[in-house]
Image (spheres, rainbow, N blue to C red):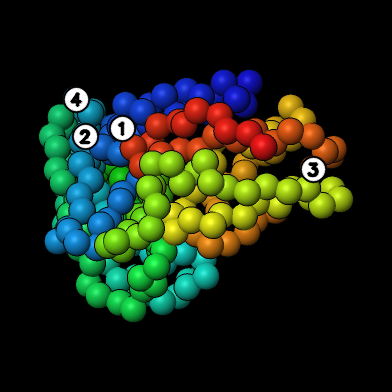
Amino acid sequence: MNRFIASIAILFSCLSCMAHAGIIMGGTRVIYHASDREASLSVTNADTHTPYLVQSWVENDAASKGERAPFVVTPPLFRLDPEQKNLLRINFTGAQLPYDRESVFWLNVKSISPSQKGNSNKLQVNIKSKFKIFYRPTGLAGDPATAWQNLQFHISGKRLIASNPTAYFISFYSISVAGKEIDEPGMIAPLASKEWPIESSGQVKWRAINDFGGITDYAQR
């Protein structure tokens, strides 16, 4: 059942939209190329009656929590009327980021629905979604479309260890060892390692999520 739900979620990702209540986002991730002046993500209110306030901002990853992220989002707060569309523009404000690998940040988008007139005690519905922003320096080695195929895996005791020799973040869709899937495999950073507990040894198979939110084929070791 969990895999079925996950598959449906990725299907919508492949259609390049993500919906919560009446708000639909035009993607599941943002690739910010260093050579570009800005990146953008569309926001659509699919509701036929309800307007929303949409608030957006960028955060650092957990390793740099508390520091100001080097991005601004325009507009940071706006009203989106029923069946209307707007564009979030993301601009890099400048920072000393690694030049030999990607960096990751988080775009937060909060949609706020109004309370009904005369219901002053009624709570508003606030829904916040998070989207990865991958800052991609110019001239990185390798191909981001095939980087996931270059992952290296080995088993040590009851641990599966993955190494990412590439300059790109790899977001996993699934990993299995001897046919047993790992819950929430997450993401592995460039030029880094990650490990998970496993029950037994065997063949490792994995799939990743590409730049467009789609699912790759299987690779195995």
| Residue at the disc numbered 4 | 48
Q: CA distance from mark 1 to mark 4?
A: 18 Å
Q: CA distance from mark 3 to mark 4?
A: 48 Å
Q: Nearer the viewer, mark 3 or mark 4?
A: 3
46 relative to 134 in the view: left or right = left
Question: Looking at the picture, which amino acid does disc 1 mark?
Answer: Cys
Question: Looking at the picture, which amino acid does disc 3 mark?
Answer: Ile
Q: CA distance from mark 1 to mark 2?
A: 12 Å
Nearest to N terminus: mark 1 or mark 2: 1
Nearest to N terminus: mark 3 or mark 1: 1
Q: Are marks 3 and 4 in contact (CB under 8 Å)?
A: no
User: Which of 79 and 141 lies nearest the eye of the viewer?
Assistant: 141
Q: Nearer the viewer, mark 1 or mark 2?
A: 1
| SS class, disc 3 | loop
Q: CA distance from mark 2 to mark 4?
A: 8 Å
100 relative to 50 in the view: left or right = right
In the displayed structure, 40 sits above or below 193; it is: above
| SS class, disc 4 | loop
| Residue at the disc numbered 3 | 198
| SS class, disc 2 | strand
Within 10 angstroms of label 1, few (less than 14), some, or many (20 or more) residues? some
Q: Nearer the viewer, mark 1 or mark 4?
A: 1
- Quarter of the figure that contains the N terminus: top right
| Residue at the disc numbered 1 | 17
In the displayed structure, 11 sits above or below 192; it is: above
| Residue at the disc numbered 2 | 45
Within 10 angstroms of label 3, few (less than 14), some, or many (20 or more) residues? some
Q: Nearer the viewer, mark 3 or mark 1?
A: 3
